[in-house]
Image: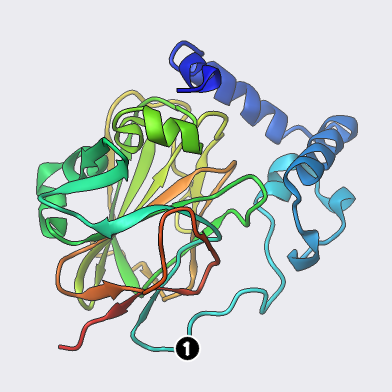
């Protein structure tokens, strides 16, 4: 375990994330421009794909970080049977949910029930599939729908705010089931689907297209919102949420509905809209 990862055990996670939020929303020209220029240079942000390519046009660092892409910068896989990659980023892990457990890294795993904060909600995903996608600071930070779904419920699960970088993933036990997260449950034509937005150190919030800011500052109890009967339907490839700093999204699928796309593996760079999995016949 690196010194930095060890240090995150004792750092004041919430204080640091609150400070990051204040900086991210600062409209002081020198502050926001220094942040934008530093991140662009350090991480190699490609603004040529952005709807607004001028880094000085953004009113805040958060506006820059959650920037929209030009129309057509990402296109969905044309196969009607394809479930889509929900975001730009890098595959952290993907594969089967074996006996209710999700693989994190060598020697590390956690249960779907721990991730979702609910044994009953996890039951439909027993022996299903999962994909964990890490969004780095250079990536497009909006998360889209792998498949058309009707929003049923969101669950804010409070927790820590560990870094979700590679060293932390390898060394912090049950990392994604310990960090603060927003679980979004959808009903689809093949059954339930869950998209889990996992917070991290310096992440200053998660926003959804249906409700705005979803992670309170900072809740200490599980918060559920019931959307049944509200008719909130999000089409395949539609935007569903955005991170106000980089983190991780985990998609859960029930068993027997899809096969993961060949060639996908841990550490592989991926782009929004490419095939994540393909529906099985029947």
- Which quarter of the figure is the C terminus placed in? bottom left
Q: Is residue 251 visible?
A: no
Residue 246 position (above or below residue 167): below
Where residue 235 sits: x, y (%)?
42, 76
Q: At which x and y percent is residue 225?
A: 29, 47
Is residue 244 shown above or below 278? above
Q: Residue extending furthest top?
A: 10
Callout 1 crowding tier (Cα within 10 Å): few <14, some 14–19, many ≥20: few
Residue 86 in percent (x, y) is at 46, 64
Residue 208 visible? The answer is yes
Q: For the N terminus, which image quadrant?
A: top left
The residue located at (67%, 74%) in the rendering is: 73
For this rendering, which residue is in front, 19 or 2? 2
Q: Residue at x 69, y 43 (%)?
A: 62
Task: Name the secondary structure under disc 1.
Answer: loop
Q: State the residue position of label 1.
A: 78
């Amino acid at each position: 375990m690196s010194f930095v990862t060890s240090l995150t055990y004792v750092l004041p996670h919430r204080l640091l994330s609150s400070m990051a939020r204040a900086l991210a929303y600062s409209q002081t020209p020198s502050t926001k421009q220094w942040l934008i220029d530093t991140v662009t240079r350090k991480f190699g942000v490609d603004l040529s794909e952005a709807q607004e390519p001028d880094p000085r046009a953004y009113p805040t660092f958060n506006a820059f970080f959650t920037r929209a892409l030009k129309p057509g910068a990402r296109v969905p896989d044309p196969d009607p049977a394809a479930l889509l990659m929900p975001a730009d980023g890098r595959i952290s892990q993907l594969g089967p949910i074996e006996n209710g457990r999700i693989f994190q890294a060598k020697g590390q795993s956690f249960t779907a029930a721990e991730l979702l904060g609910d044994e009953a909600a996890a039951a439909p995903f027993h022996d299903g599939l999962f994909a964990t996608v890490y969004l780095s600071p250079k990536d497009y930070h909006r998360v889209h729908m792998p498949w058309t779904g009707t929003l049923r419920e969101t669950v804010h699960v409070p927790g820590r705010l560990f870094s979700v970088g590679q060293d932390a993933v390898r060394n912090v036990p049950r990392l994604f089931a310990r960090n603060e997260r927003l679980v979004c449950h959808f009903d689809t034509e093949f059954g339930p689907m869950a998209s889990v937005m996992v917070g991290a150190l310096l992440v200053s919030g998660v926003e959804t297209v249906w409700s705005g800011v979803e992670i309170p500052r900072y809740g200490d109890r599980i918060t559920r919102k019931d959307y049944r009967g509200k008719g909130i339907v999000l089409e395949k490839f539609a935007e569903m949420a955005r991170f106000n700093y980089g983190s991780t999204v985990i998609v859960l699928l029930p068993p027997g509905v899809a096969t993961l796309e060949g060639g996908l593996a841990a550490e592989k760079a991926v782009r929004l809209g490419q095939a994540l999995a393909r529906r099985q016949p029947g």
